[in-house]
Amino acid sequence: MTKRITVFVLLMFFAFHPASHAIDLGGIAKHLDTLKSVVGATAKATRPISDEEEYYLGRAVAARILGNYPLSNDKDLMKYVNLIGKAVSLSSDKPFTYGGYHFAVLETDEINAFACPGGIIFVTEGMVDTATNEEELAAVLAHEIAHINKRDGIAAIKSSRWTEALAVIGTEAVRQYSSSDVARLVTIFEGSIDDVFKTLVVNGYSRSQEFAADESALQYLARSGYNPESLDAFLKRLAGRGRPSGGGITATHPETADRIDNITGKLPSVSIDPQSIQARTARFMEVREQTR
């Protein structure tokens, strides 16, 4: 049963293609058709991961994360985080993904957040508690949404894995996939999950990726009506905490002071209604009181 499920996931993850005609040296037209097929196969061998493939990979990465962190049972907090996250995502550079954006809260005091490829975003209870208002929580989610927009999780996959996968599935020949082919695809798929998981949880993204995500987050906040200055305020609070001995966002991100310096002078000029901020802050405090 497990093997059938794995094969099904692989079939959904990888894009298969129909067979082409064999070369007929006696017919120029058929020969040209074959050349056209070869060109298509070559292009396919270097193609990027599709949105659908990204979605299934992201679901597998999310499952791996949930194996390390329990999901919060607080339905009200979950709805609240989804409300904010989806409002910000609609103002991002990629408002819609293949499977849509989904936000969830992890039951841990660790201050962290994770963006799985395709649109699944986790934020910890510790991260929610660190924010002082809805603006700051929106800033955290905007940063993670930016990672999805930029496909930073997909970039974590070793290029050799994707090349090997396409070498297996990219053939135009009609054939049944052998047990060795399936075994290779399973290994590649699991290895890809490991690549993304280790980047999200252990190693973190590069400085340039984190800086770019912060800069995009400022724009998303401004477009969705949130105060972009909230990102700066949140980062300054993190900087005051210092680096913890364990895991968490400061362990997998560049020095917080460097992130603050990077966005200095880049805050969009927007006019935010003070009453709107007050209303959102009141809503934030009400939700936090209910979750304690």
Image (cartoon, rainbow, N blue to C red):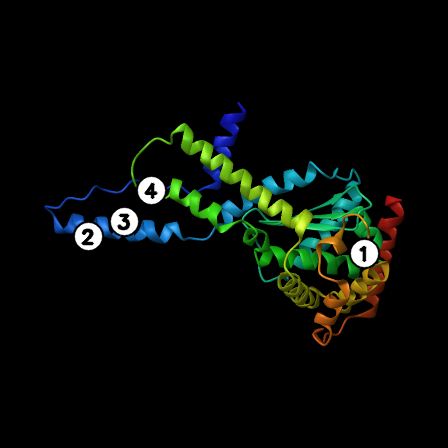
For the residue marked with disc 1, what is the amino acid? Arg
The C terminus - image quarter = top right
Q: Mark 4 points at which residue?
A: 171
Q: Residue 37 carries which label?
A: 3
Is 67 located above or below residue 232 in the figure? Answer: above
Q: Of the residues under marks 2 and 4, which one precedes in the sequence?
A: 2
Q: How far apart are marks 4 and 3 (CA)?
A: 10 Å
Q: Distance between the residues labelled 4 and 1?
A: 49 Å
Q: Are marks 4 and 3 in contact (CB under 8 Å)?
A: no
Q: Of the residues under marks 4 and 1, which one precedes in the sequence?
A: 4
Image quarter of residue 262: bottom right
Q: Of the residues under marks 1 and 3, which one precedes in the sequence?
A: 3
Going 64% across and 38% down the picture, which residue do you hit? 63
44 and 119: which one is in front?
44
Residue 166 place in picture, x, y as percent: 41, 45
For the residue marked with disc 3, what is the amino acid? Ser
Q: Residues within 10 Å of mark 1 (few under 14, many from 20)?
A: some
Q: Distance between the residues labelled 2 and 1?
A: 62 Å
Q: Distance between the residues labelled 1 and 3?
A: 55 Å
168 and 288: which one is in front?
168
Q: Mark 1 points at which residue?
A: 243
Q: Residue 32 carries which label?
A: 2
The mark lying in front, picked from 4 and 1, is 1
